């Protein structure tokens, strides 16, 4: 039966997540027997620490499956708050923490609380695609700021000030960032926060990759004041992507508002995942996660020069997360067509720039090095064999 009623107009303003379509294509090749190397999805190849898995089993067997408070289990919020103090030297009250169904739910909740219809939110282009769609979903306007190698693909105070408009209400910042793996220098982050605050705006900082910072000690934006809204997750540092568990740190005065919205939007995050996540902060789990963290800079230090040697320049060396933003323009004027070609010809899966914004998307490919070193080496061997013999395709 045909659908005769209209969809909400906002649905037309939200683009597909192209990387998911690419992974479907890769899965079809794998089903046909082709050995695909995945440098596409930003998902660590590690699983949750063993104490966390054991805690999940205990919680399930004990029947801990009822709803929790909308803001999360008290013990989990206390553990998160304690971790901020021990790892980042920041004093955060547990009452400011809202446990969410992943960082995605956290950012959606923040946009629900802060973004009015027609309000603009500054964010970098390129950037994580869902960030702009969270704003759009609440009828706000994602205000994209073109960035490039000169600012390490990151926002600066000067860029923020030059792009702030009458309808701008705040900024959504990611540091370290997807797709580039770059961070904002901490003193510059402070200047950005000051500039937003001077204009009466809000600052949302996505710190999902904060624990995966490599060239400097990680510092949370929470150092710059308790009026910020900061999000993080168990997905990346603790390798729990499918567990769908994250959190927000919100200003104390706004905690009741966020609690009210959480109650209505999703009741609570997964109870079992929450009980298990408390074990992330046990000494054994923290030691295991810290040891695994050391693997990522080793992979980065291999993949960046290897890509350059294979003919894919990397204009900015990432200092966090597990992504490389590579320039493929010397080989093809269309990174989307190039990504499909590499997938089908040499079975290496990478993400074209069109997922990440409007600023030169055809120039770049994003690679995730969240996979084993042997797989990275095989991918480079395939690229090094294939790229020299193919003609450049102009636009």
Image (cartoon, rainbow, N blue to C red):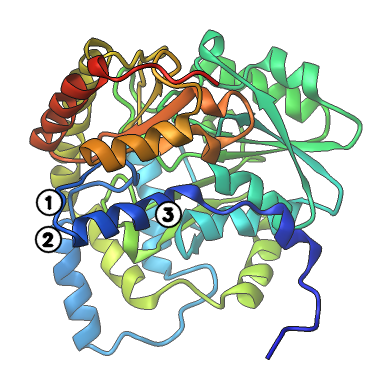
In the displayed structure, does residue 256 sit left or right of residue 41? Answer: right
How many C-alpha atoms fall within 10 Å of the one at disc 3: few (<14), some, or many (≥20)? Answer: few
Q: Please name the residue shown 11% across and 32% down the image.
A: 378
**Which of the marked residues, 1 or 3, is nearer the chain's N terminus?**
3
Residue 284: image tag: 1
Q: Nearer the viewer, residue 361 or 79?
A: 361
- Sequence-wise first label, 3 or 2: 3
Is 191 left or right of 6, judged from the image as shown? Answer: left
Q: Are marks 2 and 1 in contact (CB under 8 Å)?
A: yes
Q: Is residue 168 above or below residue 54?
A: above
Q: Is residue 314 above or below residue 343?
A: above
Q: Which mark is residue 50?
A: 2
- How far is disc 1 from disc 3 in space, using C-alphas? 34 Å
Is residue 1 depicted above or below 157 in this figure?
Answer: below
Mark 1 neighbour density, 10 Å: few (under 14) some (14–19) many (20 or more)? some
SS for callout 2: helix
Mark in front: 1 vs 3? 3
Q: Residue at x 24, y 17 (%)?
A: 389
Residue 158 in sight here: yes
Q: Which x, y percent locates residue 186?
A: 50, 19
Which residue does the numbered mark 3 point to in the structure image?
20
């Amino acid at each position: 039966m045909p659908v005769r009623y209209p969809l909400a107009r906002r649905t037309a303003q939200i683009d597909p997540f192209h990387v998911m379509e690419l992974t479907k294509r890769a899965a079809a090749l794998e089903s046909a027997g082709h050995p695909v190397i995945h440098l596409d999805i930003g998902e660590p190849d590690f699983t949750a620490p063993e104490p966390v898995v054991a805690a999940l089993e205990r919680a399930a067997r004990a029947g801990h499956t009822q709803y929790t408070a909308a803001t999360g289990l008290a013990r989990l919020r206390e553990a998160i708050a304690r971790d901020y103090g021990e790892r980042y030297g920041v004093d955060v009250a547990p009452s400011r923490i809202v446990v969410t169904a992943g960082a995605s739910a956290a950012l959606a909740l923040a946009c629900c609380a802060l973004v009015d219809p027609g309000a603009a939110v500054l964010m970098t282009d390129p950037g994580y695609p869902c960030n702009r769609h969270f704003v759009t979903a609440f009828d706000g306007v994602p205000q994209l700021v073109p960035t490039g190698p000169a600012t390490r693909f990151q926002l600066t105070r000067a860029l923020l000030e030059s792009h702030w408009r009458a309808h701008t209400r705040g900024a959504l910042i990611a540091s370290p960032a997807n797709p580039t793996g770059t961070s904002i220098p901490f003193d510059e982050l402070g200047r950005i926060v000051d500039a937003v605050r001077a204009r009466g705006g809000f600052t949302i900082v996505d710190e999902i990759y904060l624990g995966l910072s490599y060239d400097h000690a990680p510092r949370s934006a929470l150092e710059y004041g308790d009026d910020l809204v900061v999000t993080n997750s168990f997905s990346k540092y603790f390798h729990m992507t499918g567990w769908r568990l994250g959190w927000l740190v919100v200003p104390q005065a706004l905690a009741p508002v966020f609690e009210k919205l959480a109650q209505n939007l999703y009741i609570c995050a997964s109870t079992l995942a929450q009980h298990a996540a408390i074990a992330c902060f046990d000494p054994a789990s923290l030691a295991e996660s810290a040891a695994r963290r050391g693997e990522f800079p080793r992979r980065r230090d291999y993949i960046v020069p290897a890509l350059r040697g294979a003919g894919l320049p990397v204009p900015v060396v990432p200092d966090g997360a597990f992504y490389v933003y590579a320039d493929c323009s010397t080989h093809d004027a269309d990174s989307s067509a190039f990504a499909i070609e590499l997938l089908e010809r040499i079975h290496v899966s990478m993400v074209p720039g069109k997922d990440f914004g409007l600023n030169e998307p055809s120039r770049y490919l994003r690679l995730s090095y969240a996979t084993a070193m042997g797989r990275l080496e095989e991918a480079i061997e395939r690229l090094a064999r294939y790229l020299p013999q193919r003609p450049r395709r102009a636009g």
